[in-house]
C-alpha cells in the first residue's frame, strides 16, 4: 500500500504532543476536519481511505470515534483491494456489534467469499474471523464450510476458512450448527499441505471437546499422521525445524488424541510415544532445537498418562521430568512441574515422584511466580497419607512469606489436604487453627465453616478442640477467623472442659469477653451466640452472661442489637424447657462434598483447549474420566455441592453478573436473557446521569436503587438493595471504591447510618449511604461491588456508579452577550472542546423531544440561556464544575437538534478538557438509551 502523506503528517503531529491535552486538541481538530470532508459529495476513494485510516489510528490510541462508519462500509464495497482492506479493518475496529451497518458488511463478505481473486477471498475470511458477530456466524457458516471443502480451493484459503470456523465455533457454538458438517472435515487432516492440516486439526480439537463421539474417527487420522512423522521419519518440506519434522503439527495431534480413548490403537500409540521419549534422551545442541523437541516430548508424556499410566513408560517419564524441574531454564522448569502434576494426579504409585519432593519444595521459592504456582499444584497432587504431614508443614512454613496472590489458593489446599489425610485428631485441630491464624485474611469463610462442621461430626475431636479454642482466645494475637471457630466450639462443647483447671465457665466467659472490643461485627455476632448458649450450659454464670447481652442491646449495629435483644428475652423467659430446647447442642451436619473442594475447582481456569485433568489426586480425576469432554465445560457447576455454615448459608462457588454500563465482567457470549438484562442496565445507568433517583440494576434476584444529592464539590449517594427472590439472602456486602489511584475522587461509607444487615428476607430492603468528594477532576466513574449468598451460591455484582466529573456542576445564569464572548474565547484557545453528531431518531416521532432535551440539560446541572440562539429549538446552557483542590471550571453547552435528519450535534466547551469529554460522553449515553 502506498504511503499516505496526510496520515503520515497526522501521526507525526500526535507523536510531537507533549501532554494529553495537546493530543486531545489535535484529535478534535482532525475530527472536525474529517466531518467536514465526509459531507462533501466529491470525496474520492483515496481521500476516503486516508480519513478512515486516521479514524482507525485515533481509535487505537483510545479516543472515542463515532463517525466514519458509513465511509468504512463504502470502502468495503470498493473494487480496489487497498480500499477494501482498509474498509474491513475499519469495520472490525470501529463498527459496534449491533450496528445497523453490519448487515451491509455481511452482504459484502458473502459476495467477496465467492470472488475469483484469492486475495479478496482470504481478506473476507480474515475480516469475518476478526468481526465474528452472531449474525456473521449464522449467515456465513455454510459459505465458509463450502470454501473449506471445495476440491479446487487453494490451500491458503482452506487454512483461513478452517481458522474462521474455529473462531465462530468458540464464540457462538450454537449458531454454527457444527453437527451438520463436522464429520465432513475430518479427512482434511490428511491434506498434503501442512498449514491446512494444522488449521483443521485445531478446529477438530475444539469440536472434540463439544461432541467427542462424533469426532472419534479423527483419532485414526491423527495416529496415521503421527506414525508417518515419528516412526516412518517423514520429512515435511519447509516444515523441518532444527531437525524436528513439523513439531507444531506433532503437538497438535498429540493434544487431540487426549480427548479420545485409545481403544485398539493403544499398542501403536505406545510405540510412537516410546520413540519420542527415546529420541529426547539425546541432549539438544541448540536452544531452538531444545524448544521444539521438548514441546513434542511434554505433550507426548501427557498423552502417555492418558493412554495407560500403568506402563513402565510412565516411570521413565518421571525420571525425565525430574531432570527438567532442576533445569536452569524457567520455561523448562514450568513445563516439567506442570506435566509432573498431571502425572501425580493420575498415576497409581507416587514413589517415582516423591524422590523429588525436596526439589519441588525448593521451587516454592522460585523467582518466577508461575513456577511457584505449578510447584504448589504438584505438591497438592502428590500428597498422600505418608507424606501429608511433611507437605502440610512445608506449606504452612512457606505461607508466611508467600505472595498474597498465592495465599488463598495455598490455604484452600492446606485445608483440603489436612482434612483428607488426617490420621490424628489433635494434628487436624492444630493445623487448622494455625492455618486460620496465618492466612485468615486471604481465605473465605468457607474454611472456618468447614472446621466447625468437621468438629461437630466427630465426637473424638470435640474435647481437644475446646482446649485449643480456649488457648487460642488467651493467646496474645487471635485472628478473627480463629475467634469465630473458638467461640462456636466453646458455645457448643464448653461444658466438656468445665472441670479442668483454668477452664471453668467463668474463665471461658472472660477469655471470650476480652476479645470482643477489637473484634469485627461478624465475629461479635458469633461470640454473642456463644454467650447466649453459656446461659444454658452454665447456670452459675447466667447473670454475668445476661449483663453482657444487656450491654449489646443498645448496640449501633442492627444485627448485634437484634441478636442481643432476642437472646436476652429468651434467657429471661420463665420457662424451664424453652432455653434447653432453643440452645440445645447442634447435631452433626450431613455428609456431603466439602465446600473447600468445590471452591478450589471453581478457581481452575481453562484455556481455549480445555484440560483433560484437574489438579488433585487420582480419585477426583478418575471421577472426571467417566465424563465426556463436552460435559467438562464447567466443572465448578457440576461439582458444586450445597453446604451449611454455622450461622448462615455459605459459598461454594462464585457467580459473577455483569450489569454495569462499563460491563466490568461482560462475557463475549451472552444468552438472550443476559443481553436483555445488560440492555436494561444501560438504560437505567443513562437515566441516572441526569435524574437524581431511580433504578440502577434490576435482576432476577435483587434490585438496586440509587438516590443522589449533589452539593458540589460534595455529594451523598444512597443505595438500596431489594430482595426479589423467594428465599432469604445473606452475607450481604455493599462496597464502593474509586477507580482513580491518584485520589481525585474520594468515596467513603457514611458514618451516621446503620450497618448493612447480614441477611435480607424476601421483599426486604437494605440501604447504605456513601459520602463523595470531588478533590480534582477525575476521568472514570467509581465501582460498586455488591455480594450476597442465595441458596448456598454466592453472587458478586460489579456495577459502575453513575458519578462522573460532570455531576459536580452548578447552574449559572449569564447574559447572551457574555455567553457568546466566552464561547468564542474558549473556541479560540482550544483548551477543552468536545463535539459529536448523534443519531436521534426520536426527534421526528416525538413532539415533546425538544422539551425532553431541555430537561436533560437542566438535570445535568446546566442553566438554560433563553433566546440566545436564533433557532428556537437549539439549546444553549452554562454550568460551573466545582472541585476541592483544583478550583472551579466553566462549561458551556450548545445542542442543535435536526428533526428532519434525525441527528443532533452537541458541542461542549470548558476550561478543562476532561469536563468537556465527560459531559459529551454522558449526553451520548443518554441519547443512545432514549
Image (cartoon, rainbow, N blue to C red):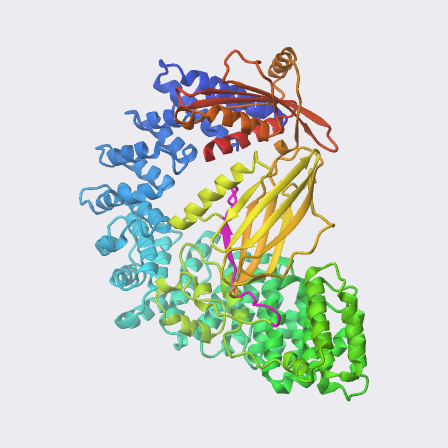
Q: How many marks?
A: 0
- The residue at the point 71 percent across, 75 percent down is 532
Residue 499 within the segment the image draws in magenta: no
Q: Nearer the viewer, residue 43 or 515?
A: 515
* Quarter-of-image position of residue 297: bottom left
Residue located 69% across and 60% down the image: 558
Inspect this view and state whether residue 185 appears: no
Residues shaded magenta: 646-665
Query: 397 or 832, which lies in front?
Result: 832
Give the side of residue 381 with respect to residue 754, left or right.
left
Q: Horizontal and vertical percent for residue 1?
A: 38, 25
- Give how far across and how far down residue 23 sits, in percent: 58, 25
Instruction: Relative to 522, say whether 48 is above or below.
Output: above
671 vs 43, nearest the viewer: 671
Percent coordinates x, y for residue 212 in the rendering = 30, 63
Vertical arrangement, residue 666 with respect to residue 604, above or below: above
What kind of secondary structure does the magenta stretch mostly adopt? loop
Vertical comparison of 776 with 722: above or below: above
Between 333 and 879, which is closer to the camera in this rendering?
879
Q: Is residue 652 magenta?
A: yes
Can residue 227 be seen in the rendering of this structure?
A: yes
Amino acid at each position: 500500500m502506498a504511503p499516505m502523506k496526510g496520515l503520515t503528517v497526522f501521526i507525526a503531529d500526535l507523536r510531537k504532543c507533549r501532554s494529553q491535552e495537546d493530543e486531545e486538541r489535535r484529535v478534535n481538530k482532525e475530527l472536525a476536519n474529517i466531518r467536514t470532508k465526509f459531507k462533501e459529495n466529491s470525496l474520492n476513494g483515496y481521500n476516503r481511505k486516508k480519513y478512515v485510516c486516521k479514524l482507525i489510528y485515533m481509535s487505537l490510541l483510545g479516543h472515542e470515534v463515532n463517525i466514519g462508519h458509513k465511509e468504512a462500509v463504502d470502502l468495503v464495497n470498493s473494487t480496489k483491494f487497498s480500499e477494501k482492506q482498509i474498509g474491513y479493518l475499519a469495520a472490525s475496529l470501529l463498527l459496534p456489534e449491533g450496528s445497523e451497518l453490519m448487515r451491509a458488511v455481511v452482504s459484502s463478505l458473502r459476495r467477496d467469499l465467492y470472488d475469483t481473486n484469492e486475495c479478496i477471498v482470504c481478506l473476507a475470511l480474515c475480516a469475518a474471523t476478526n468481526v465474528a458477530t452472531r449474525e456473521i456466524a449464522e449467515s456465513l457458516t455454510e459459505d465458509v464450510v463450502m470454501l473449506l471443502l471445495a476440491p479446487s480451493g487453494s490451500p491458503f484459503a482452506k487454512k483461513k476458512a478452517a481458522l474462521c470456523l474455529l473462531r465462530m465455533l468458540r464464540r457462538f457454538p450454537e449458531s454454527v450448527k457444527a453437527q451438520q458438517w463436522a464429520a465432513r472435515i475430518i479427512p482434511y487432516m490428511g491434506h498434503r499441505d501442512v498449514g491446512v492440516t494444522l488449521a483443521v486439526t485445531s478446529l477438530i480439537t475444539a469440536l472434540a471437546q463439544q461432541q467427542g463421539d462424533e469426532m472419534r474417527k479423527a483419532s485414526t487420522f491423527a495416529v496415521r499422521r503421527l506414525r508417518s512423522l515419528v516412526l516412518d521419519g517423514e520429512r515435511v518440506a519447509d516444515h523441518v525445524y532444527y531437525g524436528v519434522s513439523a513439531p507444531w503439527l506433532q503437538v497438535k495431534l498429540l493434544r487431540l488424541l487426549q480427548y479420545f480413548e485409545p481403544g485398539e490403537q493403544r499398542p501403536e500409540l505406545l510405540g510412537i510415544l516410546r520413540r519420542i521419549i527415546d529420541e529426547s534422551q539425546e541432549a539438544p545442541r541448540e536452544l531452538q532445537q531444545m524448544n521444539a523437541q521438548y514441546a513434542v516430548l511434554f505433550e507426548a508424556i501427557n498423552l502417555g498418562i492418558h493412554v495407560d499410566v500403568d506402563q513402565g513408560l510412565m516411570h521413565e517419564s518421571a525420571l525425565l521430568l525430574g531432570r527438567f524441574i532442576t533445569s536452569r531454564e524457567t520455561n523448562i522448569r514450568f513445563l516439567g512441574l506442570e506435566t509432573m502434576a498431571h502425572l501425580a494426579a493420575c498415576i497409581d504409585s507416587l514413589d517415582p515422584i516423591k524422590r523429588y519432593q525436596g526439589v519441588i519444595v525448593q521451587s516454592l521459592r522460585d523467582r518466577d511466580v508461575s513456577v511457584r504456582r505449578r510447584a504448589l499444584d504438584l505438591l497438592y497432587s502428590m500428597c498422600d497419607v505418608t507424606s501429608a504431614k511433611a507437605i502440610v508443614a512445608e506449606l504452612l512454613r512457606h505461607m508466611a512469606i508467600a505472595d498474597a496472590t498465592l495465599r488463598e489458593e495455598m490455604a484452600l489446599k492446606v485445608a483440603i489436604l489436612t482434612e483428607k489425610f488426617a490420621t490424628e485428631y489433635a494434628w487436624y485441630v492444630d493445623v487448622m487453627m494455625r492455618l486460620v491464624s496465618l492466612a485468615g485474611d486471604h481465605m473465605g469463610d468457607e474454611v472456618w465453616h468447614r472446621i466447625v462442621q468437621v468438629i461437630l461430626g466427630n465426637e473424638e475431636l470435640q474435647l481437644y478442640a475446646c482446649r485449643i479454642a480456649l488457648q487460642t482466645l488467651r493467646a496474645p494475637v487471635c485472628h478473627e477467623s480463629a475467634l469465630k471457630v473458638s467461640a462456636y466450639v466453646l458455645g457448643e462443647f464448653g461444658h466438656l472442659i468445665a472441670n479442668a483447671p483454668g477452664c471453668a465457665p467463668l474463665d471461658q466467659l472472660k477469655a471470650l469477653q476480652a476479645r470482643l472490643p477489637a473484634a469485627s461485627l461478624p465475629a461479635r455476632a458469633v461470640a454473642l451466640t456463644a454467650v447466649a448458649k453459656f446461659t444454658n450450659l452454665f447456670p452459675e454464670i447466667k447473670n454475668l452472661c445476661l449483663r453482657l447481652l444487656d450491654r449489646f442491646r443498645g448496640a449501633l449495629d442492627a444485627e448485634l442489637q437484634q441478636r442481643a435483644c432476642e437472646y436476652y428475652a429468651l434467657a429471661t423467659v420463665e420457662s424451664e424447657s424453652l432455653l434447653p430446647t432453643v440452645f440445645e447442642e447442634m447435631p452433626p451436619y450431613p455428609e456431603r462434598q466439602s465446600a473447600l473442594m468445590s471452591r478450589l475447582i471453581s478457581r481452575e481456569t481453562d484455556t481455549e483447549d480445555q484440560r483433560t485433568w484437574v489438579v488433585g489426586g487420582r480419585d477426583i480425576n478418575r471421577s472426571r474420566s467417566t465424563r465426556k469432554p463436552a460435559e467438562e465445560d464447567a466443572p465448578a457447576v457440576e461439582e458444586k455441592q450445597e453446604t451449611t455454615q454455622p450461622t448462615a448459608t455459605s459459598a461454594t462457588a462464585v457467580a459473577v453478573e455483569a450489569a454495569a454500563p462499563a460491563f466490568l465482567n461482560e462475557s463475549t457470549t451472552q444468552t438472550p436473557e443476559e443481553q436483555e438484562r445488560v440492555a436494561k442496565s444501560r438504560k437505567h445507568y443513562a437515566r441516572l446521569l441526569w435524574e437524581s433517583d431511580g433504578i440502577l440494576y434490576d435482576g432476577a434476584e435483587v434490585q438496586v436503587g440509587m438516590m443522589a444529592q449533589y452539593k458540589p464539590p460534595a455529594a451523598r449517594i444512597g443505595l438500596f438493595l431489594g430482595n426479589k427472590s423467594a428465599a432469604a439472602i445473606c452475607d450481604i456486602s455493599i462496597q464502593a471504591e474509586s477507580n482513580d489511584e491518584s485520589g481525585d475522587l474520594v468515596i467513603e461509607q457514611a458514618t451516621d447510618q446503620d450497618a448493612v444487615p447480614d441477611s435480607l428476607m424476601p421483599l426486604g430492603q437494605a440501604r447504605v449511604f456513601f459520602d463523595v468528594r470531588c478533590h480534582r477532576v477525575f476521568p472514570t466513574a467509581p465501582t460498586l461491588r455488591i455480594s450476597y449468598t442465595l441458596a448456598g451460591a454466592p453472587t458478586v455484582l460489579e456495577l459502575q456508579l453513575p458519578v462522573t466529573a460532570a455531576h459536580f456542576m452548578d447552574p449559572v445564569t449569564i447574559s447572551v452577550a457574555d455567553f457568546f464572548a466566552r464561547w468564542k474565547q474558549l473556541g479560540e484557545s482550544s483548551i477543552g472542546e468536545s463535539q459529536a453528531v448523534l443519531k436521534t431518531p426520536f426527534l421526528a416521532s416525538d413532539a415533546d423531544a425538544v422539551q425532553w432535551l431541555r430537561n436533560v440539560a437542566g438535570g445535568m446541572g446546566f442553566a438554560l440561556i433563553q433566546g440566545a440562539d436564533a433557532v428556537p429549538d437549539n439549546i444553549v446552557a452554562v454550568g460551573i464544575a466545582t472541585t476541592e483542590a483544583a478550583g472551579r471550571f466553566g462549561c458551556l453547552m450548545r445542542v442543535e437538534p435536526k428533526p428532519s435528519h434525525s441527528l443532533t450535534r452537541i458541542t461542549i466547551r470548558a476550561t478543562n478538557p476532561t469536563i468537556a469529554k465527560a459531559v459529551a460522553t454522558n449526553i451520548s449515553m443518554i441519547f443512545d438509551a432514549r
